[in-house]
Image (cartoon, coloured by chain):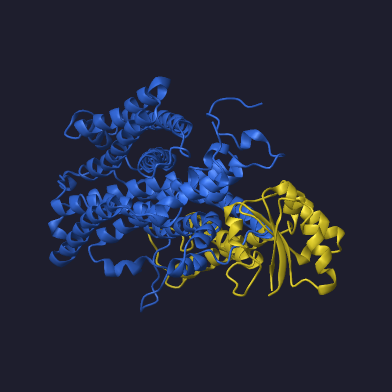
């Protein structure tokens, strides 16, 4: 595989920033319209009241909280995967890391919106902030919802900085290639970066520290999201396995989201020279591992409930296995387990197309998984007076769909204004110093030994 | 600002220029070396390597722990409510917030240390050439003394592929 020159790397990766086609404006207009529809729906919900959604007693958590858990899960694509790949110095990470880190930031922002939408009266969101009211009554720090506030904000701040730090040298490159207002803007964002040995050392040390700090934070975030469920006495929720089960599911859906984002970028920004099939094959293998891990957790959860034979839990259990939720449940199993197992397990299918199909199935399956954790349990609690049904209403469907459009819109805009692949990291691998150890630079397939 | 500098196509020629400048009596702290990628495998890439950043991150973590302990203790004791006989100051759930604030402290301290020690965000004119972002390596001296200017220029010209430039 021939290595592109430093000049070509810069030109190829800056092309989307410096040239804009009509397709970009069309895409932004379409996505913007969907986002606008979501905002209008939210405004209608605030005006007419929460009753126009399908959320009512006893099922207080529906599509909104399902989407909250889903997006927080997707956010694990970026910073966590990127941090791990940085720490193990995987050579193939270089074109992947920024694509991944961006997903984290936007998915977290969108995910964090859902509890606010779900409040019904979003202007009271500050009740969660560590800030006392007039009677000096503070938010209850023993509540998992307050833990969410701290965990999500810590992860968001860490992820934004983890994304921003390696962007600084690339913003300096854009500064040098642009003129006028854009030059001033990128110059301000580049913080006067020049590229002295001292700056490079400090940047790399900071990235190492951030990578070490961000991994436990990422794990804690989804564990705490799991605590939102496992800390309450609802059938099939109070489980010690929920923390790791949610973390595994989050990484699983995160990898799927990353594969789709990379395939789209490769196709539409013509990044074939940088996002190679080996990147998809490696991520496909990680997807396979996570599919097996997900299957293991689901088997554990179901087997223990089945052996416990507690009547209320078994009612929820059978509802999902062969009752009204069974079609969704078995669709989830096919999407999350069988499809990735077949497509990623057989080498012939582990192509870019195969990876995208498997990832799309996983995203659908993981959204269903969160829905099936929330709704059947809330609709069938311990006493018959708490039994109920749930049917999502148009306002919820529009708002949830708009967040998918918002995610794509943010991603498209980001790729338009910032190089979506780290230029300096690619240059470092394309033109290595002679004394560097090769395996740290080479894009080798996962699972092959380099001794 | 006056400056005398040269642009080199690769690390080894830049290393030669740095060695030449040292031979001409220029101290490392008076040299400017700029590159578009880390050059840590050349000797000049090791300039200014020492950093307190790890210790600063630990200090930030300690500040975070302290804030976490203070905040959770304060919120629970400022209006003590007995919930189901649970302790008013409940350390197990408090540990979650203390952990998050510890990591936040470490992350913010790392970022602040980077900005301060790498001299980011400072205004003022410094030696720079946009060709650096195209892959060239800049080696030069800012505000050189007149008596050593000739020696600096000779050191920078040791390689035929050097593009020597001056800023008056």
Is residue A215 visible in this depiction of the protein? no
Quadrant location, the C terminus of chain A: top right
Q: Nearer the viewer, residue A347 or A319?
A: A347
Q: Nearer the viewer, residue B5 or A145?
A: B5
The yellow chain is B
Residue under the point 26% across and 60% down? A117
- Which residue is at the front of the view, A133 or B6? B6
| Horizontal arrangement in the rendering, residue A1 relative to residue A380 (left or right) | right
In this picture, residue A286 sits left or right of residue B160: left
Relative vertical location of residue B46 with respect to residue A243 in this rendering, above or below: below
Kindly identify the residue that appears in the image at 38 percent across and 29 percent down. A295
**Percent x, y for residue A196?**
67, 59
| Picture quadrant where residue A146 is located | bottom left
Asked which quadrant contains residue A112, the reply is bottom left
Q: Image height check: is A134 above or below A300?
A: below
Residue A302's x, y, as percent? Answer: 33, 30
Give the blue chain's letter. Answer: A
């Amino acid at each position: 595989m021939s290595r592109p020159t430093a000049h070509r790397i810069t030109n190829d990766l800056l092309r989307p920033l410096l040239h804009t086609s009509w397709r970009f404006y069309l895409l932004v207009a379409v996505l913007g319209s969907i986002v606008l529809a979501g905002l209008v729906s939210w405004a209608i919900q605030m005006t007419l009241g929460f009753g126009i959604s399908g959320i009512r007693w006893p099922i207080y958590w529906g599509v909104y909280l399902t989407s909250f858990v889903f997006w927080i899960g997707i956010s694990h694509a970026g910073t966590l995967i990127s941090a791990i790949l940085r720490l193990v110095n995987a050579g193939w990470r270089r074109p992947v890391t920024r694509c991944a880190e961006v997903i984290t930031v936007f998915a977290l922002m969108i995910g964090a919106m859902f509890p606010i939408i779900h409040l019904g009266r979003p202007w009271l969101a500050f009740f969660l902030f560590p800030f006392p009211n007039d009677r000096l009554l503070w938010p209850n720090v023993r509540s998992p919802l307050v833990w969410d506030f701290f965990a999500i904000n810590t992860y968001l701040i860490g992820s934004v900085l983890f994304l921003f730090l390696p962007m600084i040298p690339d913003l300096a490159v854009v500064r040098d290639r642009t003129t006028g207002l854009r030059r001033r803007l990128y110059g301000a964002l580049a913080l006067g970066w020049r590229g002295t040995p001292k700056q490079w050392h400090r940047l790399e040390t900071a990235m190492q520290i951030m990578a070490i700090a961000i991994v436990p934070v990422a794990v804690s975030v989804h564990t705490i999201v799991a605590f939102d469920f496992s800390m309450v006495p609802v059938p099939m929720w109070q489980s010690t396995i929920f923390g790791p089960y949610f973390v595994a599911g989050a990484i699983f859906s995160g990898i799927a989201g990353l594969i789709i984002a990379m395939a789209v970028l490769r196709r539409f920004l013509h990044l074939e020279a940088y996002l190679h099939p080996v990147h998809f094959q490696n991520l496909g293998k990680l997807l396979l591992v996570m599919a097996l891990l997900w299957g293991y957790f689901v088997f554990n959860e179901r087997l223990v409930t089945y052996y416990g034979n507690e009547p209320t839990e078994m009612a929820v259990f059978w509802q999902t296995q062969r009752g009204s939720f069974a079609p969704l449940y078995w669709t989830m199993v096919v999407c999350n387990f069988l499809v990735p197992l077949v497509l990623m397990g057989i080498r012939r299918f582990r192509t870019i197309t195969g990876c995208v199909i498997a990832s799309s199935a996983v995203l659908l399956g993981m959204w269903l998984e969160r829905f099936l954790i929330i709704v059947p349990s809330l609709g069938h609690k311990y006493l018959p007076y708490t039994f109920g049904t749930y049917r999502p209403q148009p306002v919820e469907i529009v708002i949830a769909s708009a967040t998918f459009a918002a995610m794509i819109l943010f991603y498209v805009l980001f790729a338009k204004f910032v190089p979506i692949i780290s230029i300096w990291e690619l240059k470092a691998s394309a033109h290595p110093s002679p004394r560097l150890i090769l395996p740290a630079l080479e894009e080798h397939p996962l699972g092959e030994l380099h001794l | 600002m006056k400056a005398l500098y040269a642009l080199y196509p690769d690390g080894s020629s830049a290393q030669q220029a740095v060695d030449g400048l040292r031979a001409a009596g220029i101290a490392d702290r008076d040299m400017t070396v700029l590159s578009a990628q880390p050059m840590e495998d050349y000797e000049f890439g090791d300039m200014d390597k020492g950093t307190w950043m790890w210790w600063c991150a630990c200090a930030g973590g300690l500040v975070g722990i302290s804030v976490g302990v203070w905040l959770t203790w304060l919120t629970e004791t400022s209006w003590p409510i007995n919930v189901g006989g649970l302790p008013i100051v409940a350390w197990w759930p408090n540990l979650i917030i203390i952990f998050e604030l510890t990591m936040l402290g470490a992350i913010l301290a790392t970022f602040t240390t980077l900005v301060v020690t790498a001299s980011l965000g400072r205004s003022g004119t410094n030696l720079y050439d946009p060709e650096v972002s195209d892959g060239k390596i800049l080696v030069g001296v800012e505000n050189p003394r007149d008596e050593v200017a000739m020696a600096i220029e000779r050191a920078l010209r040791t390689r035929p592929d050097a593009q020597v430039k001056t800023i008056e």
